Image (tube, grey):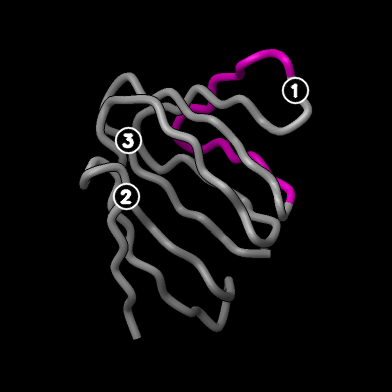
Amino acid sequence: MLNTSEYFDGKVKSIGFDSVTIGRASVGVMAEGEYTFGTNQPEEMTVVSGALKVLLPGETEWKWYEAGTSFNVPGQSEFHLQVAEPSSYLCRYL
């Protein structure tokens, strides 16, 4: 079953799904902008296209993640993103 979501006035859209091979996940796209997301459980974010500038919990420096790279976000936390061009991602809920 697919579950669609929209955030930030439609600038971020995702489709959630369950997969036998990767578990619960979502794929989505982000328009240019700055976003803050909260997590309930740990997540692994993989950039599929474009690039994301990310400030992870407990970090003081922003880091760039380009297509093909991943980062992990702890559960019960918040992370910040800067998106300079439309970008897509795969989020696995761990």
**Quadrant for the C terminus in the image:** bottom right
> Farthest left residue?
10
Residue 9 bears which disc, if any?
none
The region drawn magenta spans 60-74
Q: Quadrant of the N terminus?
A: bottom left
Percent position of residue 78, x then y: 63, 41
Mark 1 surroundings within 10 Å by alpha-carbon count, few (fewer than 14), some (14 through 19), many (20 or more) = few
Query: Disc 3 or disc 2, which is closer to the eye?
Result: 2
For the view shown, which residue lies furthest in the right direction? 58
Which of the pair 60/65 is nearer the observer?
60
According to the picture, the residue beneath numbered tag 1 turns out to be 59
Q: Is residue 10 magenta?
A: no
Q: Residue at x 25, y 34 (%)?
A: 31
Q: Amino acid at mark 2?
A: Tyr
Cα distance between the residues tagged 2 and 1: 24 Å
SS for tag 1? loop
Please name which of the two marks, 3 or 1, marks the residue nearer to the observer: 1
Query: Which residue is at 70% across, 57% downward?
Result: 42
Q: Mark 3 packing: few (<14 Cα in 10 Å), some, or many (20+)?
A: many
Q: Residue 22: x, y in percent? A: 58, 71
**Up-down relation of residue 67 to residue 40 (above or below):** above
- In reply to whether residue 73 is colored magenta, the answer given is yes
Residue tagged by mark 2?
Answer: 7
Q: Secondary structure at mark 3?
A: strand
Q: Is residue 81 left or right of residue 74?
A: left
- Residue 87's tag is 3
Q: Residue at x 28, y 52 (%)?
A: 13
Q: Which amino acid, mark 3? A: Ser
Dividing the picture into quadrants, the one containing residue 17 is bottom left
